[in-house]
Image: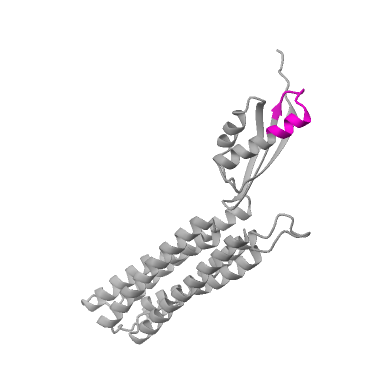
Amino acid sequence: MNNNFNKVKQVLWIILFANLAVAVLKIIIGTIIKSTSMTADGFHSLTDGSSNIVGLIGIQLASKPVDEDHPYGHRKFEMLAGLFIAGMLFVIGGRIIINAIDRLRNPVLPNVTIESLVILLLTLCINIFVSTFEYRKGKKLNSQILISDSMHTRSDIYVSIGVLATLIGIKMGLPHVIDPIASFIVAGFIFNAAYEIFKDNSDILVDKVVVDTDKIRSIVLSFEQVKDAHNIRSRGSENDLHIDMHIMTEPNLSVEESHELIHSIEERIRNDINKNVQVIVHIEPFSKKVD
């Protein structure tokens, strides 16, 4: 598990430097050519870098071993870091909207150059690489923070495409008012990314159902000794999944037989659902009702 956390940290460091390079380029060029949409996109990219830092802190805390005060471990710090990233995005989105409104009141014509368009296209290519790389690593390592962060970076791709189209439009003679309007669109993407990250991480923190109850019931009832199953619950994430349930067996089943049955159920669930799952089974005696 610690090795898994170390791999996540390595990915976050790589993505951090890539995001900072992209953000600095966009902000500098956006300021030079007086483009609010490109500058807004740059600040959006800057939050990608700051979210990587938050992710590194969250992973460091989540990697701490089980202790007396945290018998279930510290993994949920990774989700807390995701919520913090969502909060940062909401703040940045609000700032961009305020700046766009100010630019509508005090319009400035962006000085669009071929060089600025080339640089934006270059940063777009970097964003595509970063988002794809981070998402694949997140899936491979079952890391919620990497998946959340890649969703954030993915929104950068669509935002950059919009900004690129806006600047090309201004270069071709369209009214410069489309620049602050594009900033509103940028803010919309940021708010959407913030909501998705908030939802994914909060679902884990509030113990939303992770595995279909009928699927678990089907696995359990496939054992001949099990006559019924109820109170089936699941929570957690791909890397830290918990399932508990009540099963009913014949009353004369011995303690040793019950113990072996539970182990067999756990093994089947790990093979069919998730190898990282922790299963708790409560056994009850089964009795046929006589009408």
**Magenta extent:** 248-261
Q: Residue 253 falls in which quadrant of the image? A: top right
For residue 26: magenta? no
Residue at 70% across / 28% down in the picture? 248
* Outermost residue toward the left in this view: 172
Depth check: 180 or 84 in front?
84
Depth check: 224 or 189 in front?
224
* Outermost residue toward the bottom in this view: 32
Question: Residue 245 at what x, y percent from top left?
Answer: 67, 37
Q: Is residue 282 left or right of residue 42?
A: right
Depth check: 102 or 169 in front?
169
Question: Residue 264 at what x, y percent from top left?
Answer: 65, 35
Question: Residue 36 at what x, y percent from top left?
Answer: 38, 79
Question: Residue 115 at what x, y percent from top left?
Answer: 28, 82
For residue 255: magenta? yes
Residue 101 in sight here: no
Depth check: 70 or 33 in front?
70
Residue 131 in sight here: yes
The image shows residue 153, relative to residue 258, as above or below, that is below
The image shows residue 43, relative to residue 234, as above or below, that is below
Q: Is residue 107 left or right of residue 99?
A: left
Q: Residue 159 falls in which quadrant of the image? A: bottom left
Q: Report the quarter where the N terminus lies.
A: bottom right
Residue at 56% across / 41% down in the picture? 271
Residue at 73% across / 31% down in the picture? 258
The image shows residue 158, relative to residue 222, as above or below, that is below
Q: Residue 279 falls in which quadrant of the image? A: top right
Residue at 57% across / 45% down in the picture? 274
Q: Report the quarter where the C terminus lies.
A: top right
